[in-house]
């Protein structure tokens, strides 16, 4: 007869490993090198080829779609990173491709980013605070969005393109499908028009300069002008209408 009392134990282990995989995915997607180093240290400390180790490694690989395009950056090949890369597991080579550091063979040089003025930096800092409190719930602190809910902001042609379109999206929201980086997202983004001109400019300056972006900051006077010219609009923008705006 089957040993029925063992089922809850096996199910509990399954849930534990599932949780670990989700935890590893979230930590790696955060793109925080400090947090990821702690995760790698945890993985190295596990016995090789256990279900727990496999769950953690598979969790990291679930970020491949986003991190292949923009690998997680480390300042150097730390001891934790070196030990992790020496693990005997077929997944390690794939995960290595999701990370980069100074001195890594084939690593791309850091982009040259135009420095912000004192005023622009203050706007960026305000935008970071506002983004974290409002926008990050959907677009996530790492800017990679959420499948089925919010498109990525990292390297988005909408974020780095026309500020005229971007400001309108913030002021009035977005309705219907929109294509971002070749993928179509169907969503309704609410208006954030309750923010004043300085706050709207700050949020947009932040997303146009975070994540190695180098787009021009947005000025409050530009937001003010667009707010005035679109004051009678009562519905969210659609992609086709936005594309008509230079």
Image: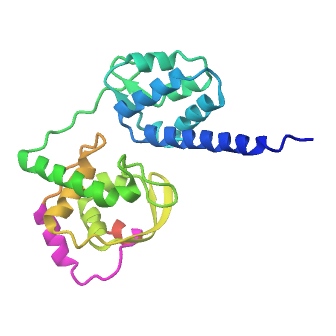
Is residue 29 left or right of 222 when viewed as pictured? right
- Residue that protrudes farthest toward the front in the picture: 5
Residue interval drawn in magenta: 220-239
Residue at x 28% of width, y 69% of height: 192
Is residue 88 left or right of 126 when viewed as pictured? right
Asked if one can make out residue 245 in the rendered structure from this viewpoint, the answer is: no
Image mark count: 0
Q: Relative to residue 69, is residue 108 depicted above or below?
A: above
Residue at x 44% of width, y 51% of height: 181
Residue at x 22% of width, y 73% of height: 194
Q: In which quadrant will I find the N terminus?
A: top right
Question: In the image, is residue 134 part of the stretch drawn in magenta?
Answer: no
Q: Point out residue 235 in the picture as x, y percentages from the top left corner.
A: 35, 80
Closest to the observer, 3 or 229 = 3
Residue at x 39% of width, y 41% of height: 30
Q: Relative to residue 201, is residue 8 depicted above or below?
A: above
Q: Relative to residue 181, is residue 83 depicted above or below?
A: above
Asked if one can make out residue 206 in the rendered structure from this viewpoint, the answer is: yes
Closest to the observer, 17 or 198 = 17
Q: Point out residue 89 in the picture as x, y percentages from the top left corner.
A: 61, 21
Q: Relative to residue 102, is residue 208 depicted above or below?
A: below
């Amino acid at each position: 007869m089957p040993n029925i009392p063992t089922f809850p134990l096996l199910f509990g282990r399954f849930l534990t490993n599932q949780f670990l995989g989700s935890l590893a995915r979230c930590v790696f997607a955060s793109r925080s090198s400090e947090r990821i180093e702690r995760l790698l240290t945890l993985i190295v400390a596990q016995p090789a080829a256990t279900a727990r180790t496999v769950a953690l490694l598979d969790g990291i690989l679930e970020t491949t779609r986003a991190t292949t395009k923009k690998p997680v950056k480390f300042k150097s090949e730390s001891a934790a990173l070196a030990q992790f890369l020496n693990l005997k597991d077929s997944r390690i080579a794939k995960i290595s491709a999701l990370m980069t550091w100074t001195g890594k063979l084939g690593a791309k040089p850091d982009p040259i980013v135009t420095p912000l003025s004192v005023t622009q930096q203050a706007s960026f800092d305000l935008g970071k605070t506002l983004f974290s409190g409002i926008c990050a719930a959907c677009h996530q602190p790492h800017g990679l969005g959420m499948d089925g809910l919010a498109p990525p902001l990292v390297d988005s042609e909408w974020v780095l393109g026309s500020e005229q379109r971007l400001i309108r999206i913030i002021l009035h929201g977005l309705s219907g499908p929109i294509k971002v980086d070749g993928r179509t997202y169907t969503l309704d983004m609410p208006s954030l028009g309750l923010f004043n001109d300085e706050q709207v400019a700050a949020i947009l300056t932040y997303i146009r300069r975070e994540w190695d972006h180098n787009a021009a900051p947005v000025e409050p006077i530009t937001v003010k002008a667009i707010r005035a010219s679109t004051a009678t609009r009562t519905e969210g923008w659609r992609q086709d209408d936005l594309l008509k705006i230079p």
